Image (tube, grey):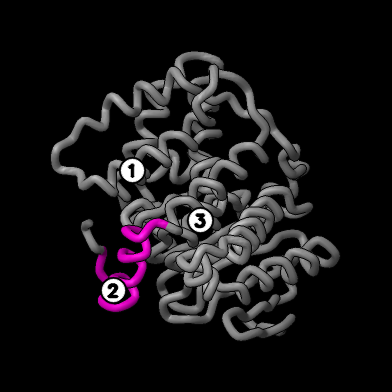
Amino acid sequence: MTRTTAFDSADVHCWHSGDGALCLTMTGERPSITADVLAGFERALAIAESNFRMLIIGAEHKDFGYGADLGDSVTAAAAGNVTPLDGVLDHYQQTMLALRHAGVPTIAVTKGVAISGACEVLMHCTRVVAAPKSPIGLLETSIGVLPGGGGVKEMVWRAAVRADGGNLTPALERAFDVLATARIVYARDAAALDLLTTQDVISDAADLVAVAKDVGHSLQRAGYRPPPRHPMIRVAGSDGLARLRTGQQDATLTAHQLCVNDHLAQVLCGGDAPPRNVTEATLLDLERRHFLTLAQMPATQARFAHLRATGTVLRN
């Protein structure tokens, strides 16, 4: 297969091979979702919507990606200036929505690890093509924050779809457990936990990009249209929040982890108000606001520092 380069930048390579698919691959051995990667997504989307039938997002090496690289904005937040971090999170969220609502199918391909910020990329693509044992999960609560790139919003929406106008509680409690415990599961098990969907493709094929291209062409033949923007999402409100808080009577959790989990519960339930329908933007705003609050806490900053220094999670 002959590759024609569309563009290169510090962290991505964008190319095509004349078959209607534009491909963007993250080039690091342990990719994180950097500002350059987000800019690459935006640039590739613009090219794909003008000249191609789909955008495929993958990685040059085995692992799809790890967390989001928030740069110096975290340090600024620790000093009391949350404006840079708020801007980074907003840009992240809007880029994820651009993947969701692109004029062509966006298909993520993962053979290896896809966690935290990279998992949020999977969750916002039209489809995911994953190897069965690709580890997937949202781990942000383990470092003292919560998913801030649309991951919590996505879990709320998927819980509401599962409930289909009925009782939100079972799906909501499952979502809370998945996020609060920072669970990682294999891709083959991820749809049951709403980290993937039943429409995503689990494949042990040697060439997952070829599988993704087949998926993209099938979507186009079926008359692909992006999902409507600005969906209304059912939230459990104060009723669900009380239920989740009651379930947090666990002596093994540290005081800070209980605090993190409570912030998570507030976002999952759409705040402490009656059950109702809210906009997608409302949930994204809640994500950012609670992320910013947690990021300024000394205990969370200690977790950030410990992770940077040792590569392991601090239990404080």
Q: Which of marks 1 and 2 is in front?
A: 1
Indicate the quadrant where residue 10 lies: bottom right
* Residue drawn at the location 64% of the way across and 28% of the way down: 278
Marked residue nearer the N-terminal end (2 or 3) = 3
* Residue drawn at the location 43% of the way across and 50% of the way down: 146
Cα distance between the residues tagged 1 and 2: 23 Å
Q: Is mark 1 on a helix, strand or loop?
A: helix
35 over 244 or under it: above or below: below
Q: What element carries label 2?
A: loop
209 over 153 or under it: above or below: below
Marked residue nearer the N-terminal end (1 or 3) = 3
Residue toward you, 33 or 3: 33
Q: Nearer the viewer, mark 1 or mark 3?
A: 1
Q: Residues within 10 Å of mark 2 (few under 14, many from 20)?
A: few
- Give the labeled residue for mark 1: 259
Q: Residues within 10 Å of mark 3 (few under 14, many from 20)?
A: many
- Give the labeled residue for mark 2: 311
Indicate the quadrant where residue 246 lies: top left
Q: Position of residue 185 (x, y in %)?
A: 31, 50
75 over 27 or under it: above or below: above
* Residue drawn at the location 76% of the way across and 60% of the way down: 53
Q: In the drawing, what numbered circle is on residue 129? A: 3
Cα distance between the residues tagged 1 and 3: 35 Å
Does 257 lie within the magenta span? Answer: no
Indicate the quadrant where residue 216 lies: bottom right
- Residue type, mark 1 in image: Cys
Q: Is mark 3 on a helix, strand or loop?
A: strand
- Residue type, mark 2 in image: Gly
Residues tagged 1 and 2 counted as in contact (Cβ below 8 A): no
Q: Is residue 216 in view?
A: no
Residue toward you, 230 or 271: 271
